[in-house]
Structures are given as C-alpha cells and as structure tokens.
Image: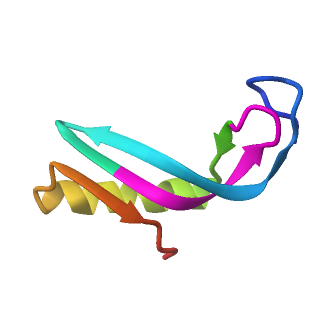
Amino acid sequence: MQCVICKQGTTEPGDATVTLERAGMTLVVKGVPAQVCSNCGEDYLDEATTAHLLEIVEAAAQAGVQVDVREYVAA
C-alpha cells in the first residue's frame, strides 16, 4: 500500500518499536510485526497485532508496571 503520511513510499513487511502510555505507565514493545514505509519509515499495524498489544499493556498495567521494555511475542 502507499504510505498515507509521505505519499511517496510503499509499505513492506518489517518490524516496529511501539511505545504505549497509559495512566502514568510507559511500555515499549520491540520487534512488533508491521508494514513499514520504504521512504519515511512510518509503520502500520494490523488489527490482530494491535489487539494483542492492547492485551499486553492491560496485563502490564494490572501488574503495576511503571516503565518496561519488552520483545513482542505473538499470541
């Protein structure tokens, strides 16, 4: 697909680093599968990956995490 940000690059399979913030908690997840723009590097996540990330952040919040860096592990 064509990148909606730069409108010049096309997306290719790759990995992204996603930072999620919630109620004073910061969670960084590395190695998230994404479509990445070949021109500007903007990343796009599919619905299933986004849902899994939201589950991860919910579990971290319930565990009392304030700051954490994790590797993405598919469900």
Position of 55 compared to 39: left or right? left
Position of 49 compared to 64: left or right? right
What segment is highlighted magenta in the picture?
Answer: 28-41
Position of 62 compared to 70: left or right? left
The foreground one among 44 and 69 is 69
Which quadrant would the N terminus be assigned to in this image? top right
Q: Residue at x 32, y 57 (%)?
A: 69
The colour scheme of the drawn protein is rainbow
Q: Residue at x 26, y 39 (%)?
A: 22
Image quadrant in which you'd find residue 53: bottom left
Q: Residue at x 31, y 55 (%)?
A: 57
Asked whether 7 falls inside the magenta stretch, the response is no
The x, y position of residue 23, in whole percent, is 18, 36
The x, y position of residue 13, in whole percent, is 77, 58
Q: Residue at x 51, y 50 (%)?
A: 17
Magenta segment, principal secondary structure? Answer: strand
The foreground one among 61 and 47 is 61
The x, y position of residue 18, in whole percent, is 47, 47
Q: Is residue 10 above or below residue 65?
A: above
The foreground one among 73 and 31 is 31
The x, y position of residue 20, in whole percent, is 37, 43
Position of 4 compared to 71: left or right? right
Q: Is residue 23 above or below residue 49?
A: above
Q: Is residue 70 above or below residue 42?
A: below
Counting labels gives 0
Q: Residue furthest top?
A: 6
